[in-house]
Amino acid sequence: MSFNLLFHGRIQRQNLWFLWLVLLFAIPSGILTAKPISDYRWESFYEIGKVHEQLNRLDNAYYYYDKAERWMQGQKASDLQKADLYNAMGRIRQKQNKPYEAEILFRKSLLYKEDQENIHLFLGGFQYERRRYAEAAQHYGRYLSRVTTDPDAARSAAIAFARAGKPQQGRELLLPYGSDNEDIRRECAALSLQSSQETLLACHIRALSVNPLDAESLREMWRISYALFQAKGNHIHLQDSLIAAEQLHFLFPEIPEGGYYYALSLLAEKKYGNAAQVLAGFKRSEGMELPALMIEAELRKRKGERDRAEEIYSAVEKISGLLQEQR
């Protein structure tokens, strides 16, 4: 071995020892004396998760919340702490648009603490979308018992109660949000003589924002928005007509044409099964025989049963002619 190679090898070994010494003193002592895994506290992971949630790092937040939940199983935690952790986990899943996972976690949270407004509001909407109206009404009711100034939630709750067969209870929920809108009604009447349909529709929507139990403005909102949809094909107008018809039909079941309006809007939305259900419900209503037949004919036509639809349309024309003669 040459002198150069030998000398170079010694230099390399010296460098390695020097490197080890540098690393030894550069590494924080806490790392060399890290706590055993068994010493970690679930609260630490929970606090880290909260920091990530504040920074809107949802995946990271859920990772630490989930880690906290797993460590919590073998450690002491109060019912309030458990409720808060499951609430936080459900909140993340809600923000991530994972409602089914959020529901499971929120229900776990309610096991430990019943009065949590955000959970009842979420579950009210969640159950409403799944047509579980009685349970939706129950959750909305619990939310509104603690949050008394939320008109949007009150409207949703009112419809949920009405769909669950309790229209009077639904109307009572809206009473605190109603006040005299006679001045706006007079303004709408004046606008009907000279303004565009869009301006008139906005006026009736404003009247309903002041008094959500104004059945006449609901009628006008449906009539105008449905006519605008037919004329222009704008889906926003169709949605407005559905909102007005749904409220009129369920909150005021004593007004039979509400069902007729609702069925027509559902037909335009291509929700044929829902329209047929509404039709079955108001066929028995006095004075609604012709609208019921008209909607049935439209349903048949949309399903491709054109011959049967024409038969029904002919029957409608005959009945209408007889009624005109009697007058």
Image: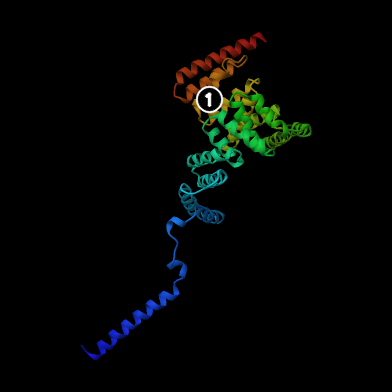
Residue on which disc 1 sits: 275
Q: Which kind of residue does numbered mark 1 sit on? A: Ala
Which quadrant of the rendered structure holds the C terminus?
top right
Residue 303, given in percent of the width and then of the height, sits at: 45, 24
Where 110 sits versus 305, above or below? Answer: below
Label 1 sits on a secondary structure element that is helix
Residue 244 seen anywhere in this rendered image of the structure: no
Residue 258, given in percent of the width and then of the height, sits at: 62, 24
Q: Residue furthest left?
A: 1
Residue 148, quarter of picture: top right
Q: Nearer the viewer, residue 71 or 126?
A: 71
Residue 89, given in percent of the width and then of the height, sits at: 51, 47
Residue 113, quarter of picture: top right
Residue at 43% over, 59% down: 36
Q: Residue furthest top?
A: 326
Residue at 79% over, 34% down: 183
